[in-house]
Amino acid sequence: MNIFADFTQRVKNILQDLDLKDANGVAPNLSRVVVEAPRDPAHGDLATNAAMVLAKSLGMKPRDLAEQLVAKLNADEDVTETTIAGPGFINMRVAPAVWHRVLTSVLEAGTRFGAQEKDNPRKVNVEYVSANPTGPMHVGHIRGAVVGDVLANLLEFAGDEVVKEYYINDAGSQIDTLARSAFLRYREALGEDIGEIPSGFYPGDYLVPVGELLKEEFGASLKEKGESEWLPLVKERAIAAMLDLIREDLATLGVTHEIFYSEKTLHDRSGANGSKIDHMLDTLRDKGLVYQGTLPPPKGQVPEDWEDREQTLFKASDFGDDTDRALKKSDGSYTYFAADVAYFQDKFERGFNETIYVLGADHSGYAKRLQAVGKAVSDGKTDVIVRFCQLVKLMRDGEPVKMSKRSGDFITLREVVDEVGSDPVRFMMLFRKNDAPLDFDFKKVTEQSKDNPVFYVQYGHARCRSVLRRAIEETSLESIDDTELTRADLALLDDSGELELFAKLAEWPKVVEASAETHEPHRIAFYLHELASSLQGQYNKGYDLPHLRFIQSGNLKLTLARLALVRAVSLVLASGLSILGVNAPEEMR
């Protein structure tokens, strides 16, 4: 039950019954009419903007329209009070029965409360992480990995069909460097003294096992071959080993992808019709979106694919980009951007009508070009959403954390997860908006205190479970069944803190919907913290006011009503934590 959607529809029905028309006799567009929770709960339970957004088009004063709406709303048995605030906002108080229906809905739906089912779900591709397969995941990849993974979980919970995808950058010069670095470790495995790793190579110890594997497979035979022979062999093995390492690293964080998409396949010309990049270029030519020309030098740092000579260009500026983009260099080779366009076209041809890219802050200039590609290739049929993740600064007691020895020059993802666990990492990566900088302090995220958000939320769930267990020990109840709890007398719950929990539970479907629409998964973490705070506040009241304790051994009816509320809170906390990929513990010590 989504009371905001429910009451929004009630307001729209009233507006339609009023048969309002503008000066041309046209009924108003009701798409901007919403019902939401007021910013200040003292103003009411619900508020609508209907009069404010419609009055101008109808040639009316907002307050006059609000008075007509209020007259009708007052006839609704679920509305106990209405007030008009300011120029025309309408605040409403709802009957207790509304909150009771919400709580019953939670108990009936379980952890699926708030989930959406769509008649025509979007087919969504979420691409995230997509780090070069040249080493283990490092701290710079953590935030994007979590944001992308949780965003995909959220969209699926909101009723979309979602595919999690990783784009393997396995066609660039960095892969040649990886292979040459692995070959050094191969020579080392054969007993050579390779000395100091040359500048520009990958120095980390993570390539030592790759050298050993090459030795086991090839013995010393690779040393007898020229680079043109051994390079492709080593490259293939090194990429496979790095992808295994990446998958293992991501798994420690609870991150998985359904598809690992190789950039090399875009360049593959083994088929009868050429490569996917060739196909993309033909498609854009057919649309008249490709021409031969030169580009002015860009401001600031000059990209590798810029040339002061004629190139094959894509009319990206026709679709909102700052400039046209090179697809083919003067020597006939394709640019990096050409592969990006072909990759999007492949997604479009796979049937996705929304593609999401979760990128690091260093790619901030990519949004306009990716959106231009989406409009051009799909003729506007596929939405392109780009989300950027700012850097994470690792701290320990306020001091920066030193670099890793294993990786050579960075802190690995696995080191972070091994020290504090997956749950604190995943939750804290979302406790600030993705485009805001984030300080991650190892000590703070492992403290068992209310100042540690992930502990506070998990403790809230564990406390609910503890209350339910103690109820069986301290009352005549032999078990607690959700079906039985739906029959509890919820009218007995009238304390302000209990009503606050009712209202907070009612917000959950709206939070899910809004988070999915705006692609902002951090809203889930914020909401869970607020819900846990409301729960803990009500629990703590019982220390000073025994009649407010959840378990009243001398009053089974009241106990059952409060257990229904506690159980509902536990279900929503568990549901939200599941979306975040964080455990909902039964107990915490």
Image: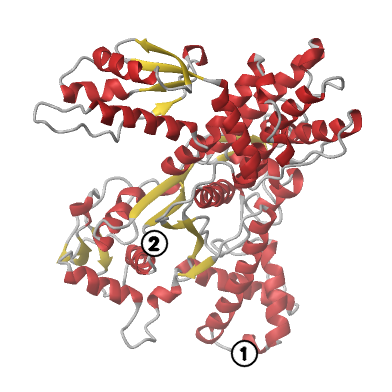
Give the quarter of the image for residue 172: bottom left
Residue at 61% in and 20% down = 499
- Amino acid type at circle 1 is Glu
Give the quarter of the image for residue 82: top left
Could you say whether the residue bearing mark 1 is in a helix, strand or loop? helix
For residue 393, side relative to residue 2 (left or right): right
In the rendered image, which residue does mark 1 sit on? 224
In the rendered image, which residue does mark 2 sit on? 352
For residue 46, side relative to residue 249 (left or right): left
Rendering coords of residue 228 (x, y %): 50, 84
Give the quarter of the image for residue 399: top right
Callouts 2 and 1 close, C-beta under 8 Å: no
Query: Can residue 169 be seen at all in this image of the molecule?
Result: yes
Residue at 55% in and 41% down = 114
> Relative to 43, is 30 above or below?
below
Residue at 67% in and 39% down = 571
Q: Cα distance, mark 2 to mark 1?
A: 48 Å
Rendering coords of residue 562 (x, y %): 73, 26
